Amino acid sequence: MRMMWKLNTGAAMAERSVMCSGARSHAALRCWRRGIAVLGATALLATLSIGAASATAGAATSPSGGVPTPGSGSLGDRLYPTLGDGGYDPLHYFLNLRYATRSPAQAVDGTVTMTAKATQALSRFDLDFSGSGVGAVQVDGRKAHMVWTGQKLVITPAAPIALGQRFTVVVHNFTAKPTTPLAGEEGTTAFFITPDGSATAGQPNLMNSVYPCNDYPSEKATFSFRMNVPAGETAVANGDLTSERTAAGRSIWTYSENQPMATELTQLVAGKFTVIPRGEVDGVTVRDVVPTRLVGQYQKLLSVEKSQVAWMEKRVGVYPFDQFGSLITDAPLGFALETQTLALYGNTLITDPVAVSAPTMLHELSHQWFGDSVTPSSWSDTWLNEGQATWYTYTYAADEGYIKQASGEPNFTALMKDWYAQGDQFRAKYGPVALPRAGGGAHEVENDYSLQVYYGGALTLYALRQRIGARDFDRLERAWVSKFAGRSVSTADFISLASAISGHDQNAFLRSWLYGTKTPPMPGHPDWTVTPVS
C-alpha cells in the first residue's frame, strides 16, 4: 500500500499508500493450503449457481495461435498502463541472489529464471525491469536478442514460441541497488536500506526495479529463492525455509513459496536480523524477523500474532498459507505492507500502546486472505483488498476494546457514520471506490491507495451487510476467500458472488456504491447524512 492513512485520532497507524466448522488436523490444513480439496466452505459453493465472470488471468490469447506476433507489451491497466505483457502467463520464478558484502547499501547481483506458458504464438515478449543493470538473456537454453529500454526488457527468442508452449527465460547478472528514501517520499522505492541490512516493498508498481518480471497483480506464479550472503548474515524470503548451509565464509539460504504470489508481494531481506520462532497455531508456523539488536524491544509486542491468526480463522476460514510473521525494519517507512507470509513494518508502527499497534498488525494479517491469496485482477480493484482489510482492522479493534483509541469513535457504528458523512468528499477528491482517479505520475499511487479505497471500501461492505444481513455477509466473506483462493479476481466477481449468496441481484446496489459519484443512502440508517462538498 503506497498511501499513508491515519486513524481518526491522528495516531500513528498506517498502511502503504494506507466460523471454522468441525475439527481439522494440522496435516489436513497443510494439504488444503497446497491446493488439495478438503471439506469446508467449498461445500457451500457447490450448492450455488454463480454467474460470475471467471477470474481474470491477465493475458489475452491470440485468435488463431498461428503466425507468431509480439506480446502486448503491457496489460493496459488504466492506472499503470505500461506494466505487464499479455503474451504469456508466468508459472514460476527462481531468484538466485548474491549479496557480496555486509554493507546494507550494496547492489545485489542476481539471475532470474522464469518458466511461463505462451497465451499466443510469440515472436517476442517483454519483462518489466527498471533496475541498475542486466546481462545476457536465454530462452530455452539458447541466446536471445534483448533490448533494454530502462523500463522493459524486450526479448526476441532464437525461435518463435508456439501458442500453449511452455518456455524458460533466464536473465543473467541483473543488478539492483537499494536506496534510502527521501523524507516524505518513503513509498517511492522498492528496495531500501536500513541500519541492519536491506528489504523490499514493491507494491504497487516497483518490484520490477529489483528483478525482471511480469509485474502485474493478475500475473501470479510460484517462487523459489536462493540467497547467498556473508556468513553470519541472515537472509529471509517468502515461504518455507528449505535449506541453510555455511561454507567458505558464505551462507546459502533457500526458500520456496508454493502458493501463487503476485510479484509486488515479494520480500527479500538480508543483514543482521534474527528469526524469532513463535511455534504453530492451527497448523500455521509463526515466525518473526527482527533486527538482532532490537529483539528485546519487539519480542513481546509481536506476540499477539498467534491469537490474531485464530481470530481471523474464526471469521473467514483456514489461513491460506503455511507461514505467517512480521518483519520489523529500523527504517521510518511510515507504512506497512502485506508481503506474502511475512508482513513488513517500519519502525514507527509497532509500538505501544497495543491498542494502536495490534489493529495495524491485524490489518496486514487480514491481507494474507484479502490481497495475497485472493489478488485483484487490476489496480482499480484495490478496494477488494484494502476495504476488506480496513473492515477487519476496526472489527477487531471493536472486539478487543480498542475502538476508541484506534478510531476516536465510541463504537464501530459511529465510525461508519463518520466515514459516511465524508463519502462525497472522498468521491470528489479521489474518484469512486472501484474507479480511482487516474492522475498520472505519483498521483496514480495516491489515488489507488486513498482514504476512499480504505474507508470507502469498508463503508461499502458495511452497506452490503446492512442490506443482506449479517448471516449472508459472513457466508459471502468465507465463500470469497475459499472460491478464489490463489487466483486474481475483479469487482464483477465480487458482485456476482454477493448476488448468488444473498439470493438477490446486487448489481445495481453495489455498482452505485462502487462506481457512483455520489454516496448512496445507507440501508437501515435513513437519518445518516452526507456532508456537502464545498
Image (cartoon, rainbow, N blue to C red):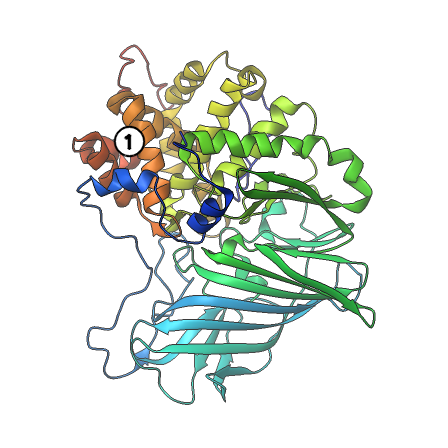
- Return the x and y of residue 73 as percentages of the image width and height: 38, 70
> Could you tell me which residue is drawn at 38 percent across and 48 percent down?
485
Q: Quadrant of the C terminus?
A: top left
Closer to the camera in the image, 17 or 212 = 212
Closer to the camera in the image, 260 or 171 = 260
- Return the x and y of residue 517 as percentages of the image width and height: 29, 33
Closer to the camera in the image, 425 or 303 = 303
Where on the picture, by quarter, is residue 246? bottom right
Using the image, determine if residue 170 lies above or below residue 479. Answer: below
- Return the x and y of residue 389 as percentages of the image width and height: 46, 35
Residue 344, can we see it? no
> Could you tell me which residue is drawn at 39 percent across and 27 percent down?
425
Residue 342, can we see it? yes
Using the image, determine if residue 91 lies above or below residue 520. Answer: below
> Could you tell me which residue is drawn at 53 percent across and 81 percent down?
137
Q: Is mark 1 on a helix, strand or loop?
A: helix
Q: Is residue 307 left or right of residue 433?
A: right
Give the residue type at disc 1. Answer: Trp
Query: How many numbered badges does the structure rendering display?
Result: 1
- Return the x and y of residue 172 as percentages of the image width and height: 59, 78
Which residue bears the numbered disc 1? 513
